[in-house]
Image: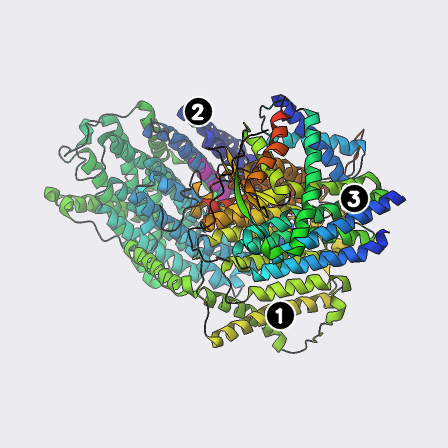
Amino acid sequence: MTETVLPFAILAYLLALLLCGVRLLRGPSAEDRVLALDTLYVVALALIAALSIALGHPFNFEGVLAIAMLGFVGTVAAALYLLRVKGGSNADVG
Amino acid sequence: MTLLTICLLPWCAALLLARLRSATAAFALAGACALVVLGLLGQMAQAVWAGQTLQSSVAWLPALGVSATLRIDALAWLFATLVSGIGALVILYARYYMDGDERLPRFFALLCAFMGAMLGVVLAGDLVLLAMFWELTSLASFLLIAFNAPDRGAVRGARAALAVTGMGGLALMAAVVMLGRAAGSFDLATVLAAGDVVRADPRYPWILTCFLLAVFSKSAQFPFQFWLARAMAAPTPVSAYLHSATLVKAGIFLLLRFYPVLGGTDAWFFAVSTAGAITLLLGGVAAVFQHDLKGLLAYSTVSHLGLITLLIGFSTPTAIVAAVFHVINHATFKASLFMAAGIVDHECGTRDLRNVNGMWRYMPLTGSLAIVAAAAMAGVPLLNGFLSKEMFFGEALALEGHDPIALLAPLAALLAGAAGVAYSARFVHDVFFNGAPINLPRTPHEPPLWMAAPVAVLVLLCLLVGLIPTPIIGAPLAAAAHAALGGSLPSYSLALWHGFNGPLAMSALALVSGVGIYAVLMRKRALHQRPLPDPWGYRQFERLLLTLARSGVVLVRQLRGDRMRLQMAVLALAAVLAAGWPLLGGGFEAHLPELTAAIPQGGIIVWVVGAVFAIAATSARNQPVTVLLFLGAVGLAVALAFAGLSAPDLSLTQLFVEVATVLLLLLALQRLPVEAPPVRSLGKRLRYAAIAVAGGGGTGWLAWEAMLRKPPAISDYQLANAVSGAGGTNAVNVIIVDFRGFDTLGEITVLAAAALIVWAFLARERAGVLGRFQGSFMLPTAVKIVMPFAALVAVHLYLRGHNLPGGGFVAGLLLAIGLVLEALALGSWRSPHARPVRWLAAGLGLALLTGAASLALGYPFLTSAFGHPVLPVLGEIPLASAALFDLGVLAVVVGATVMLILAFAFGREEGKK
Amino acid sequence: MPMWADICVAVLLIVGALAALIGTWGMLRLPDFMTRLHAPTKAATLGAGCALAALALRFYFVEGGSSLRYLIPLGFVFVTAPVSAHMLARAWRARHPVTPKPDPAMPSASP
Amino acid sequence: MSRSGLRWGWFLTLWVAWLLLHGQASVGSALLGVIVAWGVVAWLVPGLPSKRIRPWVLIRLGARVLIDIVASNLSVAWLVMTRPSRTRPAWVSVPLELPDDIRVVMLAAIVTLTPGTLSVEYDAEHASLLVHVLDTAEPAAVAAEIKTRYESLLLELYA
């Protein structure tokens, strides 16, 4: 049963990845892009998990862990940065 | 082993002293250190005087033929004894000179460090080691001159000394490398035996030039004499120790040491004796006209150093004997004179010769000691100075062959002798007699007994050597001269009385005319009205510094700020040219990349996403943050691609580096204008695009070619030997911490230095707490929950590093990122766990200790040991000493990363104070 | 792998994939940033969570208990997702002061 | 829980996490885990005083949150699929009675994790949580629901 579902799941995750990419490219605000990048990390995580099941051996565990942690760190850092430059302009910094 | 103790003891003492608070304890420790060194040297005396050479050696960089060899012969023994003996006296003296100064422990620490450096120079049995210690003496001298740092004179003096002697150090390095090549070894004994080969070598003139530059700069020979006068801004104990008895003698030591190798040629004769003669006269005349007591002594030191140099330049065996003898004599009387001058300064509050007069009434004891020492300096009979001066006059008269100099030498000697008498007379008469003191800040009186004691000891030595030279100094002098000559010893006599002869007549003439000159100059205190002579050399030096600084400003103006694009373009172009140049020569067979083979089919989407964002990031309309976020996406794609190509190590490292970079750039961006000026003209954009494509494409292509070529690579060896040679299956990690451990040590040292520089520049005025973040209420809690897990994962990554992807570097980055996040969440750089300086220190210390441990066990530095001990309960544990080294790498990475990022986050902002 | 586990893995994968797809779709289609923020923070998180859980479950029957370690990144994602969203919302509010005033919604009586 | 109790909790959690990380249940890795977990706790976990937790309440809270996550995920999914451009967003400020920061953070996290609501800011002075609602006709009802469904349980959490 898993075998039948897997291709569709992977396809869906890839599609989600692309959608994130589109939002990241389009913006329009810096917050949007940060959000998109954060989501990109999360979706990449899911994609890796699905691919591991498909390939039959788990992807490097530390890599998974690193992606999970670093996505968070990057988002927080970017948000802190945006908080600090708020005085800049009402127009999008992004 | 004793040699190693002698060499290391002062350094250990210095380290301890730097942590001490109590002046008494510091004094006891420093004094004990000097005395122990002296005692150890005393133990060796008999053996060394008998002509033995003791040696102890540890392989250091065996691949380069460099080893940490220590070697002592009679010449080295003599200088080492001077260094430690006068060191002990100066420490006693400084205890009272700087009584009540809370910086005393620091002072003693620096003094001991200098002693260690100087002993290193003297005892080094290897040229590279010698050059290293030589640099350390310059550094220690710099720190000691700058001891009263905010003081302008101290800072300028220290700067001049460091610039001049540092330049000399570079020259010495060059000389050492060439000499080592010419002689075929860096080992001192081998080099000393290879004099004929070296002198016949075509590089000989270059070696000699560099060598003499080093020697002359250190020993304040013309035209570098000016730094010594400036160095008088140092506390007087320093002047007595470094700038009369030891540091400036390092140059002389080197001249004597390498006389058998480099000496005896015409070039040597002319260069050394000319510089010596000019210095001798210049210093002597300048000394007479100084108004500063220490200035007078400084120029007299310059003059005496010139005298010794001149003697060595004469290149006759007896002249070398005289030079060695005068080194000893000068050290004793000049150190005591400096100490006496210090006492006068200390008691009067000034050392201006125009004010300090008639001291005899106030301090007869100091006066009588100083008068004896000054008489020795002038060369009055019955004192040691007389003996060596006599020998000097004899040499000057006996000089043959080189016509102009043979004629001029006696004349110059006589003139210098007279000048010497004149300034000695001035020292005695002006300070202790010549009326009454004028406008002294306080009423002088005798110093504490223990402060005068070191002076008394030295003066007593002057007297004893002067009266009964042979029993006192005969044996060590003979042995040292023998060692310096490297051959047979000439016949000479140390007797006080040689009958009526030329030298005696010259001595008498010098004495009479010197006193006469002084009397004429000082008539009606006329000398006090004369302006200071132009300190030749120093002004030129200052002008040179100024020119350098100005051209630096011009250069910076050309390069900085809005020229950033140009800078990057130039860099990229240079790289392209440098890489492309060899290809133009032909004979290079290009392989066109077959794209289809390179990309695994499943990963194509990842590659496309990465490429799209890489291209999108170059769009000119983007704001910096957007570019950064795009690059984040590219980084993720690259990491995934690495992982897909079965390079989990790279993937992991790429991810961590990526995030650390983004953090750093975000914080740096905040200091930059939000909007970068866009490049509008199409031509420019095309040009930049071309450069970018050439750079990036070229790099990629080169990498491609390199991978296709697969040269008989060392990597194969390393892969094959990772398990058997170092007990690890993660070849990357094994290479970093084991096979190339020494490189890694260098790299983490550079990393630490770079981080410290940034820290020092940006974080000079750290904002204690950062209100600007308006800390979120959720973030701190979240970080508190996440941090322990991050630490756990870091430990995990570190522990498995030797066998599986991970290792100290990645673990350190993870920990650092966590710590930075913690600091950011708390809004304060005073995060309880992020102590970057401590991390750095601990890491470097651990890495060094691991290396040193293998040294102590008798293996070359950083040899790694490994084993798989099977412990009860715990099971088999792969244990490699490299793991400890890796822990050091981890700590350095944590420290440096945290330091860099926090410096940006909390550092001083431009324009704000 | 027993039947029930197979079904569980399949369901988890389907649910996760749909959640991720919907979340990112929402992020693409919703009209302004604050509403866009809603979609991926839970949906995509749920997607990743489901996928990781499926992974852990699937490999439990291959490599045993050690596959449970994939629950660590799972927990991590769930702990950090609200914080990320919160930080972004704060950043947005700080930089766009035109956001409407909140309704003074006072429930009349707390039960 | 007492001061040391909290640290024990952390220790156990980290120890289990270590075993999971190591992926092997040998005696050696268990012992190593004890050392590492103890070290991390000693280094990073502050000894905060905290109270005893009612486990039953915690379980009920967890179950409720899980159910809500699934349920509201469905509703939001429906919303996103059907009329993404016609949402009715609102800002709601929820007055809270929670006495300590930790529970405020927990509530905020729960609010964010359940789809449709997003906690943005906590005003400590007025003890109110600013929440952004994705789609609602009646903001006041949302606030009331947050209070009844989660805050009441959180208030009962500590014994």
Of A17 and B497, nearer the camera is A17
Q: Amino acid at mark 2?
A: Ala
Say if B134 sits above or below D107 in the image. Answer: below
- The dot on residue B25 is 2
Q: Which residue is mark 1?
A: B697
Give the percent coordinates (x, y) of residue A53.
80, 51
Tag count: 3
Q: Residue furthest left?
A: B524
- The dot on residue C56 is 3
Of B521 and D153, nearer the camera is D153
Give the quadrant of the N terminus of chain B: top right
Q: Residue furthest right?
A: C2
Give the percent coordinates (x, y) of residue B901.
51, 47
Q: Are marks 3 and 2 on the same chain?
A: no
Q: Are marks 1 and 3 on the same chain?
A: no
Element marked by disc 2: helix
Prevalent SS, magenta region? helix
Give the percent coordinates (x, y) of residue D141.
58, 39
Residue drawn at x 55%, y 57% is B628
Q: Amino acid at mark 3?
A: Ala
Q: Where are the magenta residues, as a range?
A: B111-121
